Image (cartoon, helix red, strand yellow):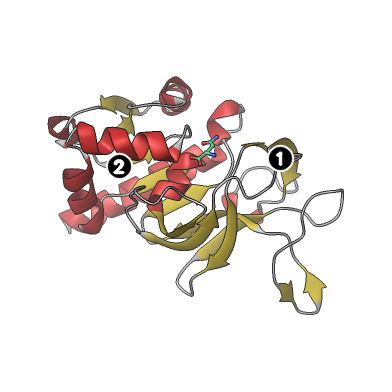
Amino acid sequence: MTIGVLALQGDVREHVAAFCDLGEDVTLVRRPEDLEGVDGIVLPGGESTTVSMLLDSSGLFDPLDAALAAGLPAFGTCAGMILLATEVLDGRSDQRRFGVIDLTVRRNGYGRQRASFECDLDVPGLGGPPGVPLHAVFIRAPVVEAVGGGVEVVARLPTGGGLAATGPVVDGEPTGPVVAARQGSVLATAFHPELTADRRLHRRFVEMVKERAGERRS
Ligand code: GLN
């Protein structure tokens, strides 16, 4: 099984290191032919407008779009989340996206003063030692403003503590905005899990890729 990391711009090396830590084979994807033999693809953080332009100029956009539409598992972090989302607010008018996870995201939506921040997230669904939070680094992150019905929420920002509480009210309680989500074989985070040593999200993606490979064999 081989994980491809889109290597046009952004924090490519950190994602490669994360999958190497987990003992997985990783390859860099820069040209259409690099997609051959890739079982899952990572879209790293960086600048979604720049990556969108580079996807066009490298000829990668259309073949990657077709592969994603055919079910290639994908993991997008920050700018990668923006590229995978169905709707992008405050983007450039010519910015392209793949639309494979039903999220509406607002670029740089945490505003100037919070353009970068860190916090601990509660992630009971990710496994690992119970009660151990996931430390998350947000860098000019997108805000998830709407989540489609088929999307599983993996993590939300905690409410209070000075962080934005813009999520919906659930059972009478305010919730923080969604910062990690999954739909089918697509996983997306508004933050940068590759910048910390916690590998739970990368491990989750590897499991998703294995599940998908198993489905295709049977
Ligand atoms: N603000 C960037 C964008 O719009 C994303 C930032 C990041 O990936 N750290 O693409």
The structure residue drawn at horizontal position 30% and vertical position 42%, both measured from the top left corner, is 40
Please identify the quarter of the rendering in which residue 56 is found. Answer: top left
Residue 112's mark?
A: 1
Query: Is there any visible trace of residue 10 in the rendered image?
Result: yes
Q: Residue furthest right?
A: 161
Upstream in the sequence, badge 1 or badge 2? 2
Question: Is 84 on the left-hand or right-hand side of 106?
Answer: left
Asked if one can make out residue 2 in the rendered structure from this viewpoint, the answer is no
**Tag 2, which secondary structure?**
strand
Q: Nearer the viewer, residue 64 or 125?
A: 64
As drawn, 177 above or below 22? below
Q: Is residue 134 left or right of residue 71?
A: right
Determine whether 4 is above or below 208 in the image.
Answer: above
Q: Residue furthest bottom?
A: 171
Mark 1 Cα-neighbour bin, 10 Å: few <14, some 14–19, many ≥20: few
What percent of the width, then of the height, locates residue 204?
A: 47, 46
Q: Nearer the viewer, mark 1 or mark 2?
A: 1
Is residue 71 toward the left or the right of residue 127 in the image?
left
Residue in the picture at 52% in, 64% down: 152
Residue type beneath disc 1: Arg
- Residue, disc 2: 40
Q: Position of residue 177 (x, y in %)?
A: 67, 59
- The image quadrant where one finds the N terminus is top left
| Mark 2 residue crowding within 10 angstroms, few (<14) / some (14–19) / many (20+) | many
Q: How many marks?
A: 2
